[in-house]
Amino acid sequence: MRRIEEYKKVIAMSAAALGLLATLTIEGSMAYFTTYVSAGGSQVVNLEARTEIREEVSEMTKHITLRNTSTKGDCFVRVMAFHGQGVEVEYIDIEGNGDWYDGEDGYWYYKPILPVGEVTSMIDVKIDTTGLEKPGVDPDEEAKYIKDKFNVIVIQECTPVLYDENGNAYADWNTIYSDFTEVDDAQGEEAGN
Amino acid sequence: MKKRRKASNNKKITYVLLALAMVLLLGSAIGSTRAALTYYSENYTAEITVSQIGVTLLENDKMVNRRDYNKDEWDQETNNEKSKENGILLQNMVPEGEKFALNKEYQEKLSVQNSGSIDEYVRVRIYKYWTDKNGKKETTLKPDLIHLNLVNTDKWIERQSDSKECTELYYKGILPSKAKTELFADGIRIDGKLAEHAEVKEDPKTHIITTTYKYDGVEFHVDVEVDAVQTHNAQDAIMSAWGVNAAELGIL
């Protein structure tokens, strides 16, 4: 027992030396050949759609063109004329090349993509007020009546260009835009940048 | 007097053992050095390079980042003039004269080449995430809206990591020196759902209709990390380097 106490220091130092040796050996066996490379890329997504309607009226006809006034995004456009009872409208694709076509849902669609800054070809909305005429009534009174009742409003809509899996451009007119105030249920990473 | 002599003897033994321990330590260090010298000396004599591991990330068959061990030092080059460590992806994603469009699939062919002189195992980690106009992480957008089209799924074993942003792909089998892997991705597409969050307003005077999108100006990111490890003692090497069980993953 006394002897052990005498050699305490020696034992401790020997243990420390052995520990050091063991560390060196472990480090050696853990070294493997490895290598790595990394790369990253990003792209900004610019989303904006802004269209302006231009209407000129002559001889009971509205001459309509639309301009894409956005600075960022190409889009598709469509128009629809709203009118009261007794008024009929007829759409005429002025170029006659089929760029404007009847979607049979009340809208007339412009087939080509409308690029930034570009203007559509013209579509005419011819207004027929025959249904408002009142035979036998004083012509001035009839004209006043038609003027009061005659109200045709052309509305325009635009939607950004989308592409299908084969790379073909299309418009998704069924998209229901959610309001800004709605909270997205998407779950992203919590970590900050 | 007898006690003093005994203490002096103990000290002597202590110093002798200490000297012995130091000699042992020195011996082990010299041993390593000698082993290293012998090792490189053999390489030199035989004119073969047995320990040069290397890996290269390829985008559309062009080098993005290469890092090889060559002549006792790391030899690295990238396609990025500003950085020797990080390559750049998606530089030519949108063809010239075109504008980026949602839902449109763009070519993004990604693969790995073994640019070293020894065979290796390879894994790839892909990180997808969004940042806002100020460069901060946009946490309301799912990484899933960035569709990186993963291919050759029989050769690249997918393992979902703990992070939703990260996908790990392990190449099945050994990638021989100078060989290329099959593609692990061939295209990228950003989901059109991004455009669903918008506000449409018409100016009653000018009749200009403006659609303002919530996510206008956000930026999507794809980062790729490629790791390679030696084939010798592969199970332990892969466990040590990547922390995964290679046999269980089925990549050996």
Image (cartoon, coloured by chain):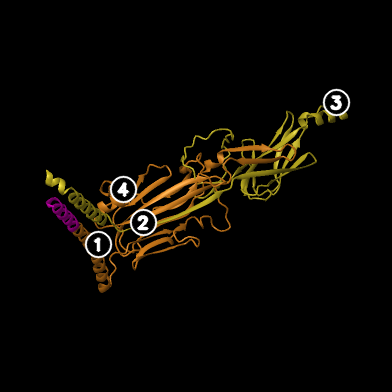
Chain colours: A yellow, B orange
Q: Nearer the viewer, mark 2 or mark 4?
A: 4
Identify which residue, B95 or B12, lies in the foreground.
B12
Q: Nearer the viewer, mark 3 or mark 1?
A: 1
- Cα–Cα span, label 3 and label 2: 84 Å
Q: Main secondary structure of the magenta part?
A: helix
Q: Which residues are magenta?
A: B1-17
Marks 3 and 2 belong to one chain = no
Q: Are marks 2 and 4 in contact (CB under 8 Å)?
A: no
Q: Nearer the viewer, mark 1 or mark 2?
A: 1
- To which residue does mark 1 refer? B29
Which numbered disc covers residue B243?
Answer: 4
Q: Are marks 1 and 2 in contact (CB under 8 Å)?
A: no
In the image, A13: left or right of B125?
Answer: left
The amino acid pointed to by label 2 is Glu
In the image, B116: left or right of B25?
Answer: right
- To which residue does mark 3 refer? A137
The amino acid pointed to by label 3 is Val
Q: Nearer the viewer, mark 3 or mark 4?
A: 4
Q: Position of residue A139 (x, y in %)?
A: 87, 29
> Which chain does tag 3 point to?
A
Local crowd size for mark 4, using a 10 Å CA cut-off: few (<14), some (14–19), many (≥20):
few
Secondary structure of the residue carrying numbered label 1: helix
> Which chain does tag 4 point to?
B
Marks 3 and 1 belong to one chain = no
